Image (cartoon, rainbow, N blue to C red):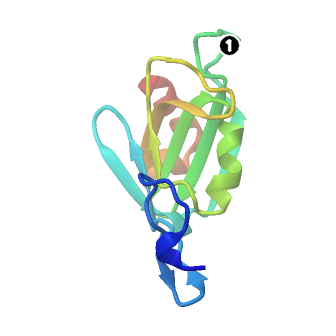
Amino acid sequence: MNPEKSHRHPNKPKRQFAGCVELIPQPPDYTEFIDAHRIWCFPINHLTHFVLQENPNNSGQKTLPPDQLVLLYPPATVVLKGWRLELMIGPLVCGRVARVHAEKHLGALILDESWVSEIHVLLRDNTILNQEKLQHWILQES
């Protein structure tokens, strides 16, 4: 088959090949966490562990995010609050999460996607080493 005469959609981007091997885009090196004030970036392969749990500030209120995902990196702890955060776990452990954007106001929810409403970044210091101080800080930021 002549590749020049293949039946392709005219607007579809042309794939790049190297010999007989199709190249895919390079996976991201960093995960960006974007809130209303700043962008934080951490190397994807520096994520040491995470904890998915119920949001301790939810109290059963439907207007508050029910989930909390705590991501631990050597220089910082990132706390995400939102809906259906369990859907992030697979892509997170595979290193496919390139960007997380906090969107405070709920729009049209898509059932098969996570919705992050809050991002809190705590730089590594006494605050995150003391569980009581960490919970107090998160409560103040909410």
- Is residue 142 in view? yes
| 71, 113: nearer the viewer | 113
How far across and how far down the image is residue 125, in percent?
Answer: 43, 54
Element under label 1?
loop
| 99, 16: nearer the viewer | 16
How far across and how far down the image is residue 99, in percent?
Answer: 45, 49
Residue drawn at point x = 69 percent, y = 49 percent: 89
How far across and how far down the image is residue 30, in percent?
Answer: 44, 62
How far across and how far down the image is residue 92, in percent?
Answer: 62, 55
Query: What amino acid is found at the position of numbered circle 1 in the picture?
Result: Ser
Name of the residue lying farthest toward the left:
37
Residue 107 against residue 17 in the figure, above or below:
above
Residue 77 against residue 58 in the figure, above or below:
below
Residue drawn at point x = 54 percent, y = 54 percent: 97
Q: In the picture provided, is 74 more to the left or to the right than 53?
A: left
Residue 125 against residue 127 in the figure, above or below:
below
> Which quadrant of the rendered structure holds the N terminus?
bottom right
Q: Quadrant of residue 45?
A: bottom right
- Is residue 26 in view? no
Q: Residue beneath label 1, please? A: 59
Residue drawn at point x = 66 percent, y = 23 percent: 66
Q: In the picture provided, is 66 more to the left or to the right than 11?
A: right
| 57, 36: nearer the viewer | 36
Few, some or many residues within 10 Å of mark 1 (<14, 14–19, 20+) = few
